[in-house]
Amino acid sequence: MFRCPSCGSSEVYRVAGGCLGELYRCKKCGYTGAFIVEVDYDRAPGNERGE
Ligand SMILES: [Zn+2]
């Protein structure tokens, strides 16, 4: 599971980065960058569930 490093949203998707490699974009705040937070969702104490 990926999370936005800016707002913490999980609504992050990968976009084509061309020669830059992988880039990610956040739907919530518009963050775009190569850096992304990867978390072990099973251990996350948050109240969001994938169901
Ligand atoms: Zn964000």
Image (cartoon, helix red, strand yellow):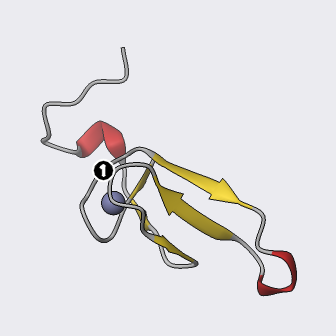
- Relative height, residue 34 to residue 48 (above, below): below
**Residue at (22% x, 30% y) in the render:** 48
Mark 1 close to ligand 1, CB under 8 Å: yes
Q: How many marks?
A: 1
Q: Give the farthest residue toward the bottom.
A: 20
Q: Position of residue 11 (x, y in %)?
A: 42, 44
- Relative height, residue 42 to residue 39 (above, below): above
- Relative height, residue 51 to residue 47 (above, below): above
Decide if residue 40 is on the left or right side of residue 44.
Answer: right
Q: Give the farthest residue toward the front.
A: 30
Q: Give the farthest residue toward the top.
A: 51
Q: Secondary structure at mark 1?
A: loop
**Residue at (86% x, 85% y) in the render:** 19
Q: Position of residue 10 (x, y in %)?
A: 37, 46
Residue that badge 1 annotates? 9
Tell me where residue 29 sits by quadrant: bottom left
**Residue at (22% x, 45% y) in the render:** 44
**In the image, ligand 1 is in what quadrant?**
bottom left
Decide if residue 4 is on the left or right side of residue 25.
Answer: left
Image quarter in which the C terminus is found = top left
Decide if residue 27 is on the left or right side of residue 7.
Answer: right
Mark 1 is on which residue type?
Ser
Q: Position of residue 21 (x, y in %)?
A: 77, 79
Q: Position of residue 39 (x, y in %)?
A: 37, 56
Q: Give the farthest residue toward the right.
A: 19
- Mark 1 nearby-residue class (10 Å; few <14, some 14–19, many ≥20): some
- Relative height, residue 4 to residue 5 (above, below): above
**Residue at (58% x, 78% y) in the render:** 34
Tell me where residue 22 sits by quadrant: bottom right
Tell me where residue 4 sits by quadrant: bottom left
